[in-house]
Image (cartoon, helix red, strand yellow):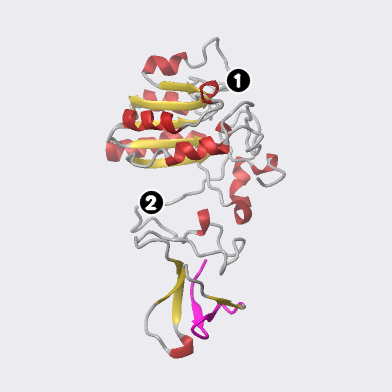
Amino acid sequence: MLSSIKIVSKTRAVFGGSRGFKACASQTLVKQGNFDGDQSNASCTRRMSGNGFNVPPSAEFVARVSGIATMCKLPFQKTAHGLDAAFVGVPIDTGTSNRPGASLALCNMNTQKLYLVPKPGRSEILLFLLFRHGPVGLIHVDAHADTSDMILGEKIGHGTPFRRCVDEGLLDCKRVVQIGLRGSGYSPDNYEWSRAQGFRVVEAVECWHKSLVPLMEEVRSQMGTGPVYLSFDIDSLDPAFAPGTGTPEIAGLTPIQGLEIIRGCRGVNLVGCDLVEVSPPYDTTGR
């Protein structure tokens, strides 16, 4: 974490006793408190725009592997007091039916900078949004529909969260889209239940060899102005690009399409989101 720096000269400063650096045009030393010659405390922020959002320190000044491993090196805070939004890491494998390992994702943060929420927790998170907003729309990006009623004899598992969400009245079913579905199924039409609820199902084969920008225009129209939850399973991406997951399925989305989906959510009334099933033991290259 960036705490303070010592001003040595107009173009040189020392961060936490480490070696000096030069301030560049895109980096600004912002005064905190009173200037006291060479001893002034200042924070170092990248002035990419004039807005008030938290901005991570530049890698020109702070090594990415140093300090507390937060998402994109954003400021760390012990509580949510005063925050409008935050990234929260939940390292568990509860409810996994295939390869475990997602509980280790946060141990890998110094290099990966990824956070996840376990799949079994999705329904609990949506229950909280329900309390604040009423039933929400859902953009679900995944290789699997996660609408099974039971998994290994249990009602709560990583393959059941959206069945439970419907049971609990957490979703506005006419504003639900599932993107990238493919792979292992447990019935002749594994997505029949989703369609019966009014979900829009976009199978992976419908996404092959094309940009998803037009799709996301339709999704934004479907979501309207109501509250929306985004749930992104890393196995939605093809394992050629993202092998670090417990349930890999071939013929998935590309990283470009993943970014098109995320960027396509701009303007949607997002009230929460998750990234799930990141499992570092299966990503030997750290990609």
Residue corresponding to mark 1: 184
Residue 203 as seen in the image, left or right of residue 47: right
Task: Please tell me whether mark 1 sits on a helix, a strand or a loop.
Answer: loop
Residues packed near mark 1 inside 10 Å, few (<14), some (14 to 19) or many (20 plus): few
What residue do we see at 50% from left, 24% from top?
145
Main secondary structure along the magenta-highlighted residues: loop
- In the image, residue 112 sits, relative to residue 239, either above or below, namely below
Label count reads 2
Going 48% across and 17% down the picture, which residue do you hit? 191
Location of residue 7 in the rendering, given as x and y in whole percent from the top left corner: 49, 83
Name the outermost residue toward the bottom: 37
Q: Is residue 68 left or right of residue 54?
A: right
Lower sequence index among marks 1 and 2? 2
| Three-letter amino acid code at the position of disc 2 | Ala
Q: Nearer the viewer, residue 152 or 41?
A: 41
Is residue 118 at least partly visible in the picture? Answer: no
Foreground pick, 201 / 135: 201
For mark 2, does the 10 Å Cα neighbourhood hold few (<14), some (14 to 19), or many (20 or more) residues?
Answer: few
Task: Tell me the magenta residue range.
Answer: 1-18
SS at mark 2?
loop
- On the image, the x and y values in percent for residue 148 come to 50, 20
On the image, the x and y values in percent for residue 275 come to 51, 40
Visible residue check, residue 143: yes
Q: Quadrant of residue 101?
A: top right
Query: Residue placed farthest to the right in the image?
Result: 284
Spatial distance from mark 1 to mark 2, Cα to Cα? 35 Å
Q: Which mark is residue 85?
A: 2
